Image (tube, grey):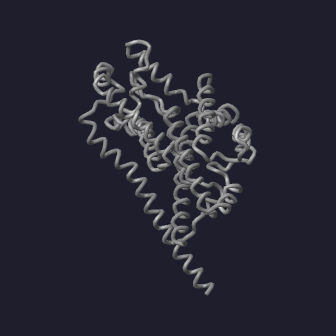
């Protein structure tokens, strides 16, 4: 009987492994191929407003009303998804909010200029300029959108260590970390998918083994790492053409990541209601997103525990409080960073 069970487990692992390979390759293929297809459709109809200033002025004037609608709708999806506990709406809003960052990456790294129209969601920010000149508008947009610059601090510390103390070339450090983080995120995604498929086949409700033994949300972690690698590329590896302008992505990245973390907390509240103490035990011994020393998340949640006398935020107000608090702190740090 034991041999049959082991044989059955091996078959399930093999099936989960194969499905994860197919799923990961499909995702990578569509990530590379769909932007090319979309770019082919868009490049003939929409100009790359980042390079030609006069055309950009005219284009922005025409498109700005639509841009405001896109921006407000995206934020509304996130807010209503969280308030109404419609997690799929919040996830959709987070994905749409991140599209401009992806289009930034695609148009700069792969020169897919047509896909730059996806940055329409950022265009309202360009209107925040104190004057009418193009340079003032660029400055205002950059100043606003770079309010998330504090997210670069962890990487800047690593960069300083390798460039100043170990004395490696900055180009080598940046390209190496970019590749390492991208491949690491792909590996985490693949392993988490394999584990998830296997658990579903076995009928396991709470996945607490394999990579889920070290973090509760490894698939979200893979997205955060992958997108953070794009931030590194955008800031340190890409050099825009002379006269070109590309809106910086840190603030939008920060909002998108916060949205994902909020969705993860809501999912956990559902799991606790469904499985009770069993999931509580799993949450108590397993890190949330990043496997950090326990003292770090303890310190992060200290203000919350002092105010609400609880270990974890669960209600909408509690979640909004903790992310609002640290959102403001990170933005203030960005101002002086």
> What is the x, y in percent for residue 33?
35, 49
> What is the x, y in percent for residue 228?
54, 41
Left or right placement of residue 55 versus residue 301 in this view: left
For the C terminus, the image quarter is: top right
Left or right placement of residue 52 versus residue 264 in this view: left
Relative to 68, is 32 above or below? below
> What is the x, y in percent for residue 19?
46, 66
- Answer whether residue 194 is visible to the viewer in this image: yes
Relative to 129, is 284 above or below? below
Which of the 4 image quarters holds residue 297?
Answer: top right
Residue at point 57%, 84% (across, down) = 4
Residue at point 50%, 67% (across, down) = 17
> What is the x, y in percent for residue 324?
59, 34
> Closest to the observer: 98 or 157?
98
Q: Residue furthest left?
A: 44
For the N terminus, the image quarter is: bottom right
Relative to 309, is 53 above or below? above
Which of the 4 image quarters holds residue 187?
Answer: bottom right
């Amino acid at each position: 009987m034991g041999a049959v069970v082991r044989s059955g487990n091996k078959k399930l692992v093999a099936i989960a492994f194969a499905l994860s390979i197919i799923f990961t390759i499909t995702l990578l293929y569509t990530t590379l191929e769909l932007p090319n297809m979309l770019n082919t459709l868009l490049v003939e109809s929409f100009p790359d407003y980042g390079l030609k200033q006069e055309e950009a002025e005219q284009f922005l004037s025409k498109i700005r009303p639509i841009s405001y609608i896109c921006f407000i709708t995206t934020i509304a999806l996130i807010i209503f998804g969280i308030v109404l506990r419609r997690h799929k709406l919040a996830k959709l809003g987070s994905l749409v909010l991140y599209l401009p960052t992806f289009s930034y990456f695609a148009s700069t790294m792969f020169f897919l200029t047509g896909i730059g129209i996806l940055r329409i969601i950022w265009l309202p920010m360009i209107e925040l300029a104190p004057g009418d000149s193009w340079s003032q508008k660029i400055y205002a947009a950059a100043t606003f959108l770079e309010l998330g610059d504090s997210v670069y601090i962890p990487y800047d510390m690593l960069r300083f260590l390798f460039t100043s103390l170990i004395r490696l070339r900055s180009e080598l450090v940046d390209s190496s970390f970019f590749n390492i983080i991208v491949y690491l995120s792909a590996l985490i995604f693949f392993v988490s998918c394999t584990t998830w498929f296997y658990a579903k086949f076995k009928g396991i409700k709470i996945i607490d083994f394999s990579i889920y033994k070290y973090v509760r949300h490894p698939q979200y972690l893979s997205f955060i790492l992958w997108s953070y690698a794009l931030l590194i590329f955008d800031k340190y590896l890409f050099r825009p053409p002379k006269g070109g302008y590309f809106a910086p992505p840190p603030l939008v990245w920060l909002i998108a990541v916060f949205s994902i973390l909020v969705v993860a907390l809501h999912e956990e509240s559902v799991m606790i209601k469904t499985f009770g103490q069993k999931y509580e035990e799993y949450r108590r011994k397993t890190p949330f997103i990043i496997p950090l020393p326990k003292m770090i998340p303890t310190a992060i949640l200290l203000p919350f525990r002092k105010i609400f006398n609880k270990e974890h935020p669960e209600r909408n107000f509690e979640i909004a409080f903790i992310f609002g608090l640290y959102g403001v702190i990170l933005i203030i740090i960005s101002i002086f960073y």
